[in-house]
């Protein structure tokens, strides 16, 4: 009797979107659907170069443009992915009711979900951060931005963000990791902070000072119990404005 094949560790790659136009303007963004800045596009391209030889079995992103555009920029450079198909959160039956052909199975499926959106900043969305500090005081704004449980007015705390991100991860992403798949997630600073807090088993005190830079891939190897076997951070090295590489032909 042949032994059962050993399932390799799951490979989870997390990327925070490149700088957005409102990041550059120092404004609270949250769920406002702004685009990447020119610098943000270059950050996404640099991430694409760092990940160009990675094979991904599936990808996930939020419903917001800046995370999606970062993902597509990454895939432009990826040598393992020629075609992909988007699967929207509430419309998956439109895409998956057919019997897939071999050609369909080679397409990378990208799942879009608002559960992976940035934290909702409520009344602060669209406001300049310096102006908000002047109005409410630096200590109060720091509490809204960095604390675990205190939300901004009519918005979400990091704890509340995690209460939608982590269940989505456990229901949709974790089963694939347990099968040894390689998963790419392009999302946001706080949705990824909440996810990393869960994966690395951080305490609320530890996550306060944790920050994921824009356009910087974090790669985790996870065992079937989703325990971290290895962690790698790929830091971009290309200076601002330098040509970062050539996209795939076509």
Image: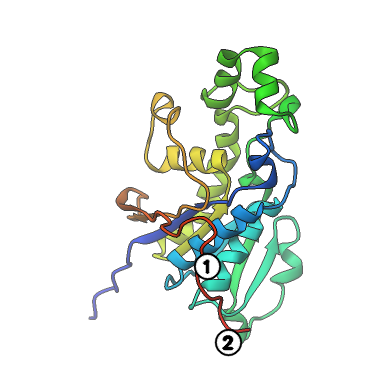
* In front: label 2 or label 1: 1
Image coordinates for residue 15, horizontal then vertical, percent = 51, 53
Tell me the number on the disc at residue 102.
2
Image coordinates for residue 188, horizontal then vertical, percent = 58, 45
**Residue at 47% across, 43% down:** 212
Locate residue 248: give its quadrant.
bottom right
Given residues 201 and 189, the one toward you in this image is 189
Image coordinates for residue 110, horizontal then vertical, percent = 62, 65
Task: Say which label, 2 or 1, has the lower sequence index.
Answer: 2
Given residues 212 and 36, the one toward you in this image is 36
**Residue at 71% across, 52% down:** 35
**Residue at 59% across, 61% down:** 71
**Residue at 38% across, 33% down:** 202
* Neighbours of disc 1 within 10 Å: few (<14), some (14-19), many (20+): few
Picture layout, residue 159 above or below residue 11? above
Query: Residue reaching furthest bottom?
Result: 102
Given residues 152 and 43, the one toward you in this image is 43
Locate residue 104: give its quadrant.
bottom right
Q: Secondary structure at mark 2?
A: helix
Tell me the number on the disc at residue 43.
none
Picture layout, residue 117 above or below residue 13? above
Q: CA distance from mark 2 to mark 1?
A: 37 Å
Q: Secondary structure at mark 1?
A: loop
Q: Which residue is mark 1?
A: 243
Picture layout, residue 138 above or below residue 11? above
Q: Quadrant of the C terminus?
A: bottom right
């Amino acid at each position: 009797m042949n032994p059962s094949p050993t399932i390799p560790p799951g490979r989870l790659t997390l990327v925070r979107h490149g700088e957005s136009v409102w990041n550059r303007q120092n404004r609270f963004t949250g769920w406002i659907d702004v685009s990447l800045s020119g610098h943000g596009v270059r950050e996404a391209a640099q991430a694409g170069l760092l990940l160009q030889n990675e094979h991904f079995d599936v990808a996930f992103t939020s419903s917001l443009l800046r995370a999606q555009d970062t993902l597509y920029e990454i895939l432009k450079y990826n040598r393992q992915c020629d075609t992909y198909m988007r699967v929207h959160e509430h419309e998956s039956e439109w895409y998956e009711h057919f019997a897939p052909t071999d050609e369909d199975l080679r397409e990378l499926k990208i799942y879009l979900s608002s559960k992976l959106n940035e934290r909702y900043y409520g009344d602060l969305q669209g406001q300049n951060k310096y102006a908000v500090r002047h109005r409410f005081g630096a200590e109060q704004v720091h509490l809204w931005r960095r604390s675990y449980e205190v939300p901004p007015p009519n918005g979400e705390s990091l704890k509340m963000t995690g209460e939608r991100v982590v269940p989505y991860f456990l229901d949709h992403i974790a089963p694939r990791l347990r099968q040894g798949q390689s998963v790419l997630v392009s999302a946001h600073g706080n949705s990824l902070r909440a996810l990393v807090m869960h994966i690395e088993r951080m305490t609320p005190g530890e996550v306060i000072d944790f920050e994921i830079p824009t356009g910087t891939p974090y790669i985790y190897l996870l065992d079937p119990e989703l325990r971290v076997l290895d962690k790698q951070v790929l830091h971009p090295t290309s200076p601002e404005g330098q040509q970062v590489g050539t996209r795939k032909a076509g």
